[in-house]
Amino acid sequence: MPRLTRRSFVAGASAATIAFALHKRAIADAKSVYRDAIVIDGLGGLGNSMAKPDAPLADAYFHDVRNSGLTCVHVTITPVGTTAPDTAFTETVLGIGNEEREIDGHADVLSRIRTVADITAAKANSCTGLIYGLQDAVAFETDLARLDALYRLGIRVVQPTYNRRNLLGDGCLESADAGLSKAGVEAIERMNSLGILVDLSHCGRQTAADAIRQSKKPVAFTHTGSAALNNHPRNRTDAELRAVAENGGVSGIYFMPFLSDGKQPTAADIIRHLEHMIDVAGEDHVSIGTDGSVSAEIVSQEFKDIFAGFVRKRQEAGISAPGESEEGYLFANELNTPRKLETLADMLSARGHRDARIEKILGKNLVRVFSETWKS
C-alpha cells in the first residue's frame, strides 16, 4: 500500500484545491456566458400551472420573467388537436390578443418579436421578447389565406401537425404515417415565402421527412428528445436529427417525461439527451425548447389536481402521447427555477463544454435559423 507522506498529502491537497478552483472558475464563466448571451427558450410559456388560462398574469409572474435572464420565449398560441377550423382561427386570434395585452401592459418586461432585430433589441433593453407560434395548422388548414393573416398578426413559427392527422399531414401518433398531403406541401411553400419557421416537433416521421425535403429554408424540431435513448414517438431518430442539421436547422431539447420512460425528467436525463443530440447533429444544430413555464412549479395538492385534470383532458381529446401520466411532471426538480437555463449552462460547463458551445445552445443557433427563415 502506498505510504501517505506529508509531501504526498500536500501535493494531493494542492491538486484538489486547483481542481476546485477550476470548477469554480468554470461556473463563474458559465454565468458570464449566460449574462452576455442571447438566451432563447425555443418553446415555453409565461407563468406556471397555477396561472388561469386567458386571464391577466399576476405580478409575481412578471417578476420571474424579469429575473429569468431570458431574451426570448417562443410561446404557443392555442388551440391544438381536433378543433373545427373556424373555431380554431377565432381562438388563435383571441390568443394573440391576450399576449398583446400582456405586452402592452408590461412594456418594461416584455416585447414583441417579429424580426431578428427585435431579438437584439430585447437583449439590449433587458426585456423578454415573445415569439408567437402555432403547434397545429387547424386554424388555417382549410384556407391558406388565413396563414397570411396570422403572419401579419405576428405568427413566426408553425407546426404543420400536432399529434393527430389534419388536412396537411399526419402527426406523430398516426399509425399510417402517410406524410404531407398536397395541401401540406403548399403550406410549407407558403411558410417559406412568408418568412415563417417550419417546426416539425409533433409531425409523423414521414411528414417530417417530406417537410425537410420540401422546405427551401431551415426547419426545426423546437422541442424534442433522442429516440436512440428513449424510443418514443415524440423523440427524433438520429437520421432525423442529421437531416434537420443538413437542412441548416436546429433540434431543441425539452424537459419532458418522454426523455425518461414517462417519469418526471431529471437534469441528468436532459443532459444525456442533449449531449447525444450534439454528438449526432453537431453543436451548431442543437438548442433548447423546454416545453415548460418560466416560473417555478410549486408541487402542492392544487398543482397535482390541476395537472391530473390536464392529463385526463388530453387523453379524453385523443391528443395525449404514450406515457403521459399524472405523475410525469413537465419539469426537472433541479431546474425548477426561472433561471433554469442558467443552471443548465452551469452544469454543461462543469462537464467540460466550452463557452462558445454553450452560447450556441442557449440561443445563438436559434438566432441563426431565424435569420435564415424570417424576413428582416
Image (cartoon, rainbow, N blue to C red):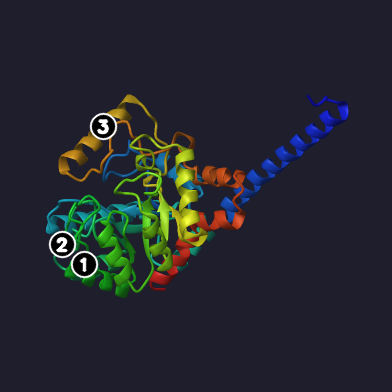
Check disc 3 and give the amino acid type: Ala
Q: Amino acid at mark 2?
A: Leu
Image point (27%, 29%), residue name: 305
Decide: few, some or many residues near mark 2? Use Cα within 10 Å; few <14, some 14-19, many ≥20: some
**Residue at disc 1, secondary structure:** helix
Amino acid type assigned to the residue bearing label 1 in the image = Gly
Badges 2 and 1: C-beta atoms under 8 Å apart?
Answer: yes
Q: Which residue is mark 3?
A: 308
Q: Position of residue 61 (x, y in %)?
A: 41, 41
Looking at marks 2 and 3 on the same chain, the residue that comes earlier in the sequence is marked by 2
- Name the residue beneath numbered marker 1: 184
- Residue 49 visible from this viewpoint: yes
* Residue 248 seen in this snapshot: no
Q: Residue at x 56, y 56 (%)?
A: 357
Sequence-wise, which precedes: disc 3 or disc 1? 1
**Pointers 2 and 3 in contact (CB under 8 A)?**
no
| Quadrant of the rendered image containing residue 9 | top right
- Residue 13: where, in percent of width, then height? 79, 32
